[in-house]
Image (cartoon, helix red, strand yellow):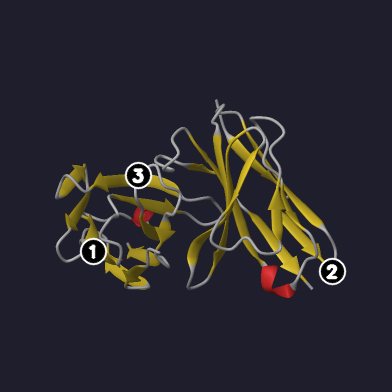
Amino acid sequence: GENVEQHPSTLSVQEGDSAVIKCTYSDSASNYFPWYKQELGKGPQLIIDIRSNVGEKKDQRIAVTLNKTAKHFSLHITETQPEDSAVYFCAASIMNNNDMRFGAGTRLTVKP
Amino acid sequence: DAEITQSPRHKITETGRQVTLACHQTWNHNNMFWYRQDLGHGLRLIHYSYGVQDTNKGEVSDGYSVSRSNTEDLPLTLESAASSQTSVYFCASSETRGRTEAFFGQGTRLTVV
């Protein structure tokens, strides 16, 4: 089955700096890669996703890149703000298949 | 507004007891899922359902069961609670089978003593 590794486990940045979280996956058949943000005491929320037919996707300050050859994908947050502080999870799956595997999570702290 | 709610938010139970966690969604989604979240493991799928009377095992289903008698609810039962089942449990629902754009509940923190 799919195995997803996520790094780093914790990340601390100054407000205004960029943050990058990286994930690798093992199953070359995976074609859907979502990112979830989990705030304290809440459930995860989808913030951005990418499918294997594109290499990059942007949504305001958030971007995700995908390298299918190397089997890794990354989340980029620019101009970080304190409200970006949360735990971020990556995941990988084959669309319409329920074998979605999550990374272990990255705790991002943005210092004002 | 449509939502997904879990109850209780916190529960402490004794080893060997049967425990049921509730999940109710008003999205009218056919697909519902239960996960557990543990440090260092992210989210792991326990059971899922594609519709009424349909249930399927996930990655870590041993010791858990679910039933789907209507579209809105997917209760999760721990048949005989064990300390290894101490965790935070999340319910989710989605419109598509691939769990794209899944909506999560706020979680239930279960402690087995």
Identify the secondary structure beneath mark 3: loop
Q: Which is nearer the eye, B80 or A81?
A: B80
| Front disc: 3 or 2 | 3
Q: Disc 2 marks which amino acid? A: Gly
Is residue B106 visible in this depiction of the protein?
no
Q: Are marks 3 and 1 on the same chain?
A: yes
Mark 3 lies on residue? A95
Residue type highlighted by circle 3: Met
SS category of the residue bearing label 1: strand
Nearer-the-camera pick, A76 or B54:
B54
Q: Which residue is mark 2?
A: B16
Q: Residues within 10 Å of mark 1 (few under 14, many from 20)?
A: some
Chain letter for mark 1? A
Q: Is residue B52 above or below residue A18?
A: above
> Mark on residue A20?
1
Determine if residue B18 is in view.
yes
In screen coordinates, is A78 left or right of A5?
A: left
- Where does the image place residue A52, in percent across and percent down from the top left? 21, 48
Count neighbours of disc 2 (C-alpha within 10 A) and say few if under 14, some if 14 to 19, many if 20 or more: some
